[in-house]
Amino acid sequence: MTWEQLLSLKRQGDNSKRLRAEQDDTRLGFEVDYDRIIFSSAFRSLQDKTQVIPLSKTDFVHTRLTHSLEVSVVGRSIGRLVGKKILEKYPHLQEVHGYHMNDFGAIVAAASLAHDIGNPPFGHSGEKAIGEYFAIGKGQQYKDQLTDKQWQDLIDFEGNANGFSVLSSSRPGIEGSLRLTYAVLGAFMKYPKESLPKKPTKNISDKKYGFFQSDKDFFKEVAEELGMIPNKTGNDIGFERHPLAFLVEAADDICYTIIDFEDGINLGLVSEDFALEYLIKLVKDTIDTAKYQTLTTKEDRISYLRALAIGNLINDAVRVFIENEEAILQGEFHFALTDKSKYKAQMDDIIKLSVKNIYQSREVIEKELSGYQIINNLLDKFITAYNNNHEGKATNYDKLLLKILPEKHHLEKETLYDRLLHICHFISMLTDGKAVLYNKIVTA
């Protein structure tokens, strides 16, 4: 892979090449991408989607929105630091093509901002609830009418693939959805493969999948335009990662490790003594002990340690990336950057404690159980109504139910796969609160 291709400013539907040297620096294409994402309704809906605690009314607990904003800030810092090193190594990128350090930061920030845009309500349990509706629920009845890959898309419903669809799928009058640059879409693609074969290797890019069968052609177009390296054979589509996807992943890993932990502390799920012990291990080389001792509240102490920890992890992620940059460009680096961090043991300890005390707390489990029931109920009601209407046998209840679908979802889908995915997409775009409201309506 080459940076010249990887930093492509092309957008879906372009007929001519966009050159970085001809860009208006006051309105750079990669920064336009950030603006388009932040003004989208899909992004706004993240304000009422679960990060750690579902349906939490506590104002200091993160939602998907605040998490995504923080990941984008961390991603921008990592991207700029990496960009500075890359331009020093390959000066022609700036001298000939006009790229700047901040371009890398803008690409990573935009992709990081969108990294959770396809996640369903109720956190990762929402993905599992959709998948299990088809794998072990009433949705099993559709299996024999779908291809293996279409079926895998549904039983392993994936927020990353749904996110790619949100960012790029056309609908009447809206070609290419947000029409982001291919560089940003490439950085967004953490798992550049289709749903089958499932986990063919232990490589980080094969851990999940990144596009639905309905988006396969455009995904392939983006990957090929960026010069990403194919790594599958036969009829299977998959690529080695865009290098900047490693930075997006690192920004997310850093934020959820440290900030979810901070939420657990603020909620009283992790004791301050434990928290201080774990965080100080991350910052012992950079902490200003005199300053720390002047902080009198738990919130200020934790905030100070959190900021130091994130700074240390950012610098270490940059180090790992630059040390492995040539292997990454050759498609021969198969790990998350944090897997090779000198702080990996400390991060693992924090994640282990978070799993025990936060992710498996009674409050989280109770809300996830409610989410399972709500999503299963909504899938069953809306899929039945949508299919009945397509087949010309809709009941009056079906017709009334479809009237409450948002206008942009009033689309005809000819194939069963497209209809099932359409309803999954509609439900995945609901906020936690809207899902609860819709469930009350359909069960009234």
Image (tube, rainbow, N blue to C red):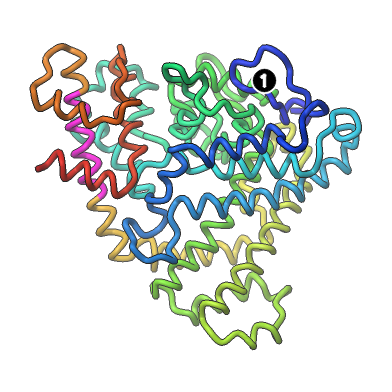
Prevalent SS, magenta region: helix
- In the image, which residues are magenta? 371-385
Q: Position of residue 260 (x, y in %)?
A: 48, 62
Q: Quadrant of residue 393?
A: top left
Q: Amino acid at mark 1?
A: Glu
Residue 214 shown left or right of residue 300 in the figure: left
Relative to 8, residue 272 above or below: below
Q: Position of residue 209 (x, y in %)?
A: 48, 32
Residue occupying the point 63% across, 30% down: 240
Residue occupying the point 31% across, 26% down: 407
Q: Position of residue 196 (x, y in %)?
A: 44, 26
Name the residue nearer the viewer: 120 or 131. 120
Name the residue nearer the viewer: 394 or 189. 394
Q: Quadrant of residue 90?
A: top right
Quickly name the residue at label 1.
Answer: 225
Residue 376 shown left or right of residue 13 in the figure: left
